Image (tube, rainbow, N blue to C red):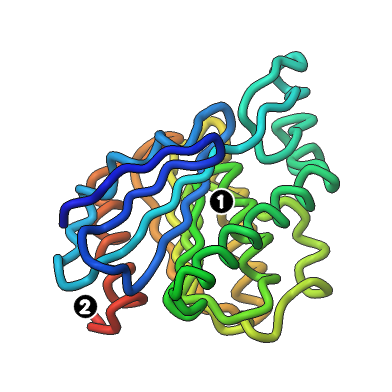
């Protein structure tokens, strides 16, 4: 599939040559930007018969406590690399609203919510889970890579009935020094306990994405967006 790359102040978009029938909104991790995951699209093996628009938003620039207050692209502040310091409520709420706006924009472009996947890596994955599980309309799926639930104790109260059965793919590195795999497992187990359909994969890697993982992601996206069950 050939794509036209469009960059604005707020995001990078890969627009397929044919009118899109589905969309993926993918949120980058702390300190990166929307360009970070653009190269993976070519590795997903999506067929030409499935034109998908990929949207890679840029997080706003803000001070991050764990990096001595240095300003960088971040979806929210992180006080400490611990379960207790994993997020700030105001920043997370702001980013969740940003995600809602991106999903609404895709719907305004003619893509139904049921054909939109919300995805994210690390901090972006935490926002994807928080926003997607609360979104008002049923999504095609949530893709959460090397990530965690920022406020697990609020999940039940904030969940959306529409997305109570949304498929979730979670992938994590067993040797992740940034987001320990235990935090991913905690999120997986809590989601499963609340009835969510979670597919979980672990890989012998650190805080990154590997080739084997991309194969699984591509297969999962085809199943969610094309319904081919592969």
Q: How much space separates mark 1 and mark 2, taking CA atoms?
A: 24 Å
Q: Secondary structure at mark 2?
A: loop
- Position of residue 54 in the picture relative to residue 164 (left or right): left
The dot on residue 98 is: none
The dot on residue 230 is: 2
Is 121 drawn above or below residue 44 in the view shown? above
Residue position marked by numbered label 1 in the rendering: 125
Q: Secondary structure at mark 1?
A: helix
**Which is more toward the observer, 228 or 207?**
228
Q: Name the quadrant containing residue 171.
A: bottom left
Quarter holding the N terminus is bottom left
Is 164 drawn above or below residue 109 in the view shown? below
Tell me what residue is drawn at x 61 percent, y 66 percent: 132
**Which is more toward the observer, 169 or 98?**
98
Q: Name the quadrant containing residue 46.
A: bottom left
Query: Can you give x and y, in whole percent of width and height, for residue 55 in the image?
Result: 44, 52
**Which is more toward the observer, 132 or 18?**
18
N-term-proximal mark, 1 vs 2: 1
Quarter holding the C terminus is bottom left
Near mark 1 (Cα within 10 A), the count class, few <14, some 14-19 or many ≥20, is many
Query: Can you give x and y, in whole percent of width and height, for residue 11 in the image?
Result: 50, 42
Near mark 2 (Cα within 10 A), the count class, few <14, some 14-19 or many ≥20, is few
- Position of residue 200 in the picture relative to residue 149 (left or right): left
Query: Can you give x and y, in whole percent of width and height, for residue 211 in the image?
Result: 23, 45
């Amino acid at each position: 599939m050939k794509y036209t790359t469009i960059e604005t102040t707020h995001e990078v978009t890969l627009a397929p040559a044919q009118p899109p029938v589905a969309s993926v909104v993918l949120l980058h991790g702390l300190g990166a930007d929307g360009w970070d995951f653009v190269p993976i699209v070519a590795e997903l093996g999506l067929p030409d018969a499935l034109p998908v628009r990929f949207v890679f938003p840029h997080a706003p620039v803000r001070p991050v406590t764990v990096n001595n207050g240095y300003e960088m692209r971040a979806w929210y502040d992180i006080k400490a690399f611990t379960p207790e310091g994993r997020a700030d409520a105001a920043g997370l709420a702001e980013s969740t609203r940003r995600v809602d706006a991106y999903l609404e924009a895709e719907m305004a472009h003619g893509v139904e919510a049921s054909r939109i996947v919300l995805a994210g890596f690390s901090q972006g994955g935490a926002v994807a889970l928080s926003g997607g599980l609360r979104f008002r309309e049923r999504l095609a799926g949530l893709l959460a890579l090397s990530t965690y639930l920022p406020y697990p104790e609020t999940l039940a109260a904030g969940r959306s009935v529409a997305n109570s059965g949304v498929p979730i793919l979670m992938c994590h590195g067993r040797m992740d020094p940034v987001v320990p795999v235990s935090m991913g497992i905690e999120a997986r187990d809590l989601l499963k306990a609340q009835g969510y359909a979670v597919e979980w994969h672990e890989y012998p890697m650190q805080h990154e994405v590997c080739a084997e993982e991309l194969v699984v992601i591509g297969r999962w996206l085809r199943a969610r967006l094309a319904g081919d069950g592969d």
